[in-house]
Image (cartoon, helix red, strand yellow):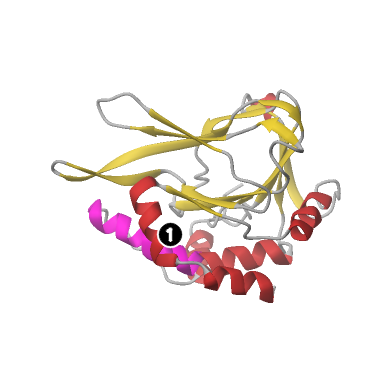
Amino acid sequence: MEGLTARIEALDWDEIASGMHERGYVILPKLISGKQCKALIDLYDDPSGYRKTVVMERYRFGLGEYKYFDYPLPRTIQSLREQLYPKLAPITNLWMNVLKIDRQFPSSFKALQEQCHENDQLKPTPLILKYGKGGFNTLHQDLYGEVYFPIQAVLLLNEPGLDFEGGEFVLVQQTPRAQSKAIVLQPKKGDMLLFTTHFRPVKGKRGYYRANMKHGVSELRTGKRYALGIIFHDAMR
């Protein structure tokens, strides 16, 4: 994982923090290699290593399927969780400060995980998602319990325009007493999208206010789309 560690350390984290604060999302281009993308896709059909499979249509979540990894996580996924979290915690703590929320997140991923486990959130939440033609994911938030980290990530594992058409990532920001704002993004293969899990601070005339945000995936017109979701907090079930 030395190459991945070097890429994460080489990123301009001041610029990333600024982008997250201003927009609630940032795309990190080519964070993982094509070889790493293929290795993660190849895991999809291996029945071992997963704790739960969800068929979206059954629960009216959309059309597609996703699988939650079980502990121990694959090395790449564990490394991403451990190395990204300390970079993101200061951003979330700034959000708590400007929104006057009495909450601060610990500096290490291990400490966050301990908080989850103290609240009976013991299940891993990283997941791999697969969509076929017509597949989509309804707008939602990945909270899973009382303890949740305000930023999460998704890695696109194959190439839009080549492996599939459509399947854009959609963020919807709900502004108090106003119409919602839709943001449509299309990361490329190997790109990581960082985005808010629940809400973000927005600066208004009287200071910062809390803007609720949900995310989903638009309908695929052709092909298959694979993505890896990295959620930092654990789940109760």
On-image quarter of the N terminus: bottom right
Residue 121 in view: yes
Residue 96 magenta: yes
Circle count? 1
Furthest-front residue in this view = 161
Instruction: Indicate the position of residue 28 as horizontal and vertical percent values.
Output: 54, 56
Which residue has dot 1 on it?
16
Element under label 1? helix
Q: Residue at x 34, y 49 (%)?
A: 22
Q: Amino acid at mark 1?
A: Ile
When the figure is inspected, residue 150 is found, relative to residue 174, above or below; the finding is below
Residue closer to the observer: 21 or 196: 21
Where residue 189 appears, as percent x and y from the top left, is 68, 49
Q: Residue furthest left?
A: 206
Compare residues 46 and 72 and report the one nearer the observer.
Answer: 46
Looking at the image, which residue is at 44% across and 66% down? Answer: 13
Q: Is residue 40 magenta?
A: no
- At 44% from the left edge and 49% from the top edge, which residue is drawn? 146
Q: Main secondary structure of the magenta part?
A: helix
